[in-house]
Image (spheres, helix red, strand yellow):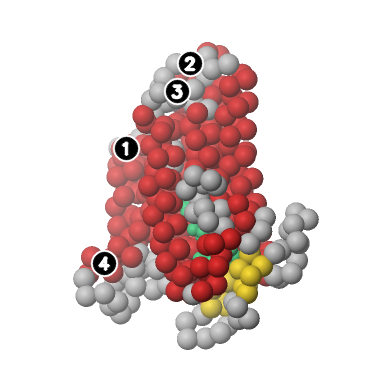
Amino acid sequence: MNKIIAFFVPTFIYLVIFAFNVLLPGRWVIGYVTKPNSTEKMRYHLNGILVFFVVVLLWILLGCSHIISCDWLYQYRWHELAGAFTFGIIVSLAVMLPYPRIKKSFWSDFYLGRVENLQLLSGRIDVKMWLYLAGATLLELNIVSFAIHHWILYGVNASPGIYLTTILITYFLIDYLTFEEVHLYTYDLFAEKVGFKLAWGCLVFYPYFYAVSLWSTVDLPNPHTPTWLFGIYALIFFFGWSLSRGANLQKYFFKKNSGKPFLCIVPKTITDGNKILLINGFWGISRHVNYLGEILMGIGIILCTGYPTLIGPWLYPLYYVAFLFPRQKDDDIRCELKYGALWDEYKEKVPYRIIPFIY
Ligand code: NDP
């Protein structure tokens, strides 16, 4: 019976997140993307951080009141994954089928989607933002459940590295939701459609694969990693975070007001009289230093598990490399088209794509 329930649990949690996303109070903000065939910017109802905490709190209350065991999501993770997989396919079809064809191939439309931005209930739900919120929240429930499973197994002999990994992933998620508005200025929002890649990616890949560092180590005993090594791993994470968050925030403030300093960095720019690009601060280090930051955060997270020679945890930062390096190339092509000769000038001034002096 539990296995059948587990199959439907991700769907249930996603629907609860949907309801809270609609019903809980939020901020209305003007985004970066313009409405189709218009110059008017899209509006978003943002309350991700509140929904996240309410859902996590409700789950903890269920655990504390012994309605479910606190590591339930770990025990039935394969059945939940199967349920999330199925729901992910259904949502991918639902956001694609009702809309006019774009490509000849059904599969291409299915994978990439047909509409760029989909909002429901007078804009109270933006499908892309809901997808990210849903994935982030279930990922948090998963990792907490995985960490509790480790505690149940090992008690006082548990590995501090498992808790540190859980804390860093939690930090990563809370950070994302705190700066939810900044996400409105990213590639996913302005350059991607809503299809399988995004819907399935957020509902299945995000909450399960991003937990792979813990999934593959919570059953293992304490590797007795020295405390000073944890310090280094945490530094790698926070160094990565500074690069990523710094670059994203600098660009966000620049897009809102191109003259305003960020962290005392006065924007230096190049322009062709029409378009304008930042060339200093984080955007002067490399053209996508935020991607380097993301990869370093991933490395910091998985090292904290204390099993640096296991392949399982490494899948996480390796995925970032496989995902972000081609994305940088795609973004370069997009920017070449949008900015023309100005982009070439930027490339001359900032020659490195991601890793300064190397790539
Ligand atoms: P960016 O935030 O780097 O956005 C690229 C866009 O920024 C370009 O298309 C261009 O768009 C604008 N831009 C580029 N260079 C400049 C410049 N010098 N001056 C002004 N504008 C510039 O990329 P993403 O949206 O891909 O990533 C955003 C963040 O999200 C990153 O930190 C990334 O690592 C993270 N991310 C995390 C993922 C995860 O799973 N954890 C997945 C994917 C991304 P415009 O047309 O607006 O000028």
Instruction: Report the quarter where the N terminus lies.
Output: top left
Cα separation, mark 4 vs mark 3, equals 39 Å
| Disc 3: residue Cβ within 8 A of ligand 1's nearest atom | no
Mark 2, residue position: 223
Q: Secondary structure at mark 3?
A: loop
Q: Which residue is mark 4?
A: 108
Q: Are marks 4 and 3 in contact (CB under 8 Å)?
A: no
For the view shown, which residue lies furthest in the right direction?
A: 264
Q: Amino acid at mark 2?
A: Pro
Q: Determine the residue located farthest toward the left in the rendered image.
A: 105
Q: Residues within 10 Å of mark 1 (few under 14, many from 20)?
A: some
**Residue 62, position in %: x, y?**
52, 38
Q: Which mark is residue 78?
A: 1
**Residue kind at label 3, given as amino acid type:** Tyr
Q: Are marks 2 and 1 in contact (CB under 8 Å)?
A: no
The alpha-carbon separation of the residues under discs 4 and 1 comes to: 28 Å
Instruction: Check disc 1 and give the amino acid type.
Output: Trp
- Kind of residue at disc 4: Ser
Disc 3 from disc 2: Cα separation: 7 Å
On the image, the x and y values in percent for residue 118 come to: 45, 72
Q: First in sequence: mark 2 or mark 4?
A: 4
Q: Nearer the viewer, residue 310 or 26?
A: 310
SS class, disc 2: loop
The residue at 29%/52% (across/down) is: 86
- Crowd rating for badge 4 (residues with CA inside 10 Å; few <14, some 14–19, many 20+): some
Tell me the element at label 1. helix
Instruction: Look at 54% across and 62% down and name the residue there.
Output: 348
Q: Is residue 140 above or below residue 231?
A: below
Quickly name the residue at label 3.
307
Q: Earlier in the sequence, mark 3 or mark 1?
A: 1
Q: Residue at x 36, y 29 (%)?
A: 311
